[in-house]
Structures are given as C-alpha cells and as structure tokens.
Amino acid sequence: MLRYFTSGESHGEALVAFLSGFPAGLSIGQEFVDRDLWRRQQGYGRGGRMKIESDKAHFLSGIRHGKTIGSPIAVLLENRDWQNWKESLPVEPGDAKKHKRVPSPRPGHADLAGALKYDFTEARYVLERASARESAARVAIGALAKLFLRELGIEVLSHVIAVGAASIADREIAWERIVPLSQKNEVLLSCADADAEQCMKEEVDKVLRTGDSVGGVFEVVAHDVPPGLGTYAQWDERLDAMLASAVMSLQAVKAVEIGAGIHAAYSPGSAVHDEIGYHRNSGFSGFTRTHNNAGGIEGGVSNGQEIRVRGYLKPISTLRRPLQSVDFSTREPVKAAYERSDVCVVPAAGVAAEAMVALTLARCALDKFGGDSLRETKRNCTGYLEQLKSY
Ligand code: EPS
C-alpha cells in the first residue's frame, strides 16, 4: 500500500516527507521535482517568505542511480529561514527571552483550537505546524507520484478559476489550455483566461491596499485516467471520497467539489447527467459522453473522462488589519496577532492539490494494478487497457 506523511515546522530546520510502498525502477528527474516545488512558490499575492525560500528536493533514501529501488523514500527540504529562527525556535531549551510568542489567536487560523488542544499558553508551536509551508513536502512526493502516473499515461495539472469575486467557474477550460500554464516561467494567477487573470490581479491589489486577504477556487485536472480506479464496494475506497479528503486536507481549503457537483445540486437530473454514446475507437473503451458534469467519477469509480476536482480556499487568516481577538495571558480584548504573511495563495494551493490528487491516484493505481517493480505495474496496466479495448 502506498503510504506517505510529512514532518517539519515552518521555521524549523527542514521539512521531511516519507513515501513508502512505491514500486522499484521508476526514473526520478530531480529537475521535474524541483520545478513543481518552484511552481508552488509562485503566484501574485505571495509574501516576503517566498523571497527567502528556494525549495529543492534533497533525497535521503529510496532512490539510487537515478531510480526508485522499492525502499521507503525520504526527502528533505531545507528551510532557509531557519537561519533567522535558530535562537527563537531551538530544539534545545534555549533562551526563553528570545522565544517569539504569538500572544493572541488569529480568527480562522489553527491558533486557538491548537493551543487549547495541546495545552500551550500561546500559539507559536501551533502555527509552526499548521502553516501551509508543510505543503511543500507534499509537493516533493506528489511529483514522484506524477512521474509514476505518467508511466501509465496519466497527467495531473491545475489552474485557477476564481480569486475573490473574479471567476470563470461557470466555464470548462480544456486540458490543452491548462498545459501551457504549467510551462510558464512567470506566474501571475495561473488562470487560462488572460482577461479574467487581470481581474483576479485586481482582486489581490484591492486587499493589498486594504490590509485584507482573499481566497478563491482552483481546479485540478487528471487527464487520461482509465475507467476503474476506486470502487463503490466499500465507503472508504470510493475515489471521490479519497480525493475530497486529500484536497480538503490542504491548509485553507474549506470545500471540495467534484465536476459540477455544486451546480448539480440545484439542477434537474436531465441537465446534470452525462449522456452515453459509443464510437468504436474513442477513449479507453469506445463509450463516449456528451459532457463531463460528473468530473470523471461515477459511483466512486473513475469513468474514463477527465477527473476534475475543485478546491475552495478561504482567505488567508493572517490580516494586516487584524480582526478582534483575546490576549492569551490577560484574556483582555486585543487585535489578533500579525506576522508576515501571504495575501493570496490560490495558484500555490492548486499545485499542492495536484500533489494530493497525484498521490491519491497513484495509490488507487497501485491497488488496482499491483506490482513491486514499474515493469510489473505497467504490464498489468497494459493488460487491463487491452481488456477495455476489447470489452
Ligand atoms: C504561512 C505564513 C507565511 C507563508 C507560509 C504560510 O510564512 P511566514 O510566517 O514564514 O511568513 O509564507 O507559507 C510558506 C512558507 C510556504 O512555503 O508556502 C502560514 O501562517 O500558514
């Protein structure tokens, strides 16, 4: 079984991610992994931290001579900002006077719930782990999952469909328009529609002026996913449930939608369900669809259409013009603490969500096709694709 988890504090020495159950024999391109890490750092509305960090994957184990060897993979990402935090956030007891307290919890952040849960007198340790910095570690192993999926013919990318009130969420953007976004060397807001992207920039400019923050919606698209990943047989093996959980687990995501799920709830069945046709040489099995409102999943199983998952991001909870809060020590009303922060992270969250979708699909593909080596997995996958062709 493919398993993964991460470790690390936002201003600690490093982030670490672990990936276990990955087949042997997959070539790992360092450049590909680092490019995804770079993509996650981009976007208009990022804060000062991204000028400090330049994320690079340092593989510690599980890869030898450029290929996976079936052993657990550990990857380390250095936090360059650690140089500025060594004294205030040391591993050893250190000097209490240098400790940077977070004296009042920020509404919307994990600060208050975390401090209550772990019995901390303030929120420093909470935000250190709750921070979206952690998503960089997921992107590193997500890139490995993408390389694996590529071998099976599957690609995963994202684009932004809304920032604040600027939205193209009512339109389906074709895969061919999403691919070039990932190849850009200057990222604004990762929207395929240039005019809409300018409106999105204006939404960010507005909150930059007012000391506020802004959220939005990204969409992850998994292209050329064969029918048959996930199953309706058991509740926790449904692909839509797994994807929803994976994307919801990202910092600041408050809702997840598969296909046109939200609009569908307000529409009659005749306007929602994707009618079925047949064209001998089309797709994986010859069956065709008039549209893809299902987002590529029916009954918890991939149906051969593109998988489309949307993540709805609340606005960043650190505000330059802070909301009302309470001092942890005195319990007196005060403004919430402010620390350097981003004001918009929708494109970055999209890249992190690509990683989560890729890891989820890789897990499902390995469940379906098995294999300890890439050769074995690919052979099993090819056999299944032939079976679909002759269905
Ligand atoms: C974050 C606060 C900011 C963000 C950070 C998430 O960091 P800092 O407090 O160091 O300025 O930049 O995101 C990242 C570091 C990252 O790599 O995405 C928070 O409080 O969640």
Image (cartoon, rainbow, N blue to C red):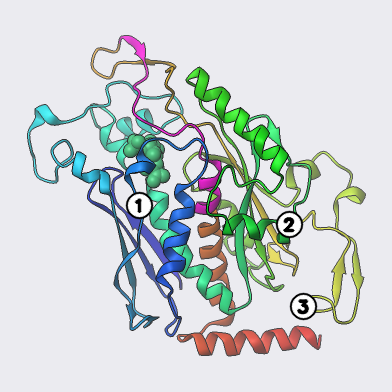
Residue at mark 2 to residue at mark 3: CA–CA distance: 16 Å
Kind of residue at badge 3: Phe
Question: In the rendered image, which residue does mark 2 sit on?
Answer: 295
**Start-end of magenta stretch:** 332-352
Question: In the rendered image, which residue does mark 1 sit on?
Answer: 54
Residue drawn 63% across and 68% down?
Answer: 230
User: Of the residues tagged 1 and 3, which is closer to the observer?
Assistant: 1
Quadrant housing residue 338: top left
Query: Who is closer to the viewer here, 371 or 148?
Result: 148
Quarter holding ligand 1: top left
Provide residue 344's location: percent of width, then percent of height. Answer: 51, 35
Kind of residue at badge 1: Ser
Quadrant housing residue 339: top left
Q: Is residue 375 above or below residue 15?
A: below
Determine if residue 344 is in view.
Answer: yes
The kind of secondary structure element at disc 3 is loop
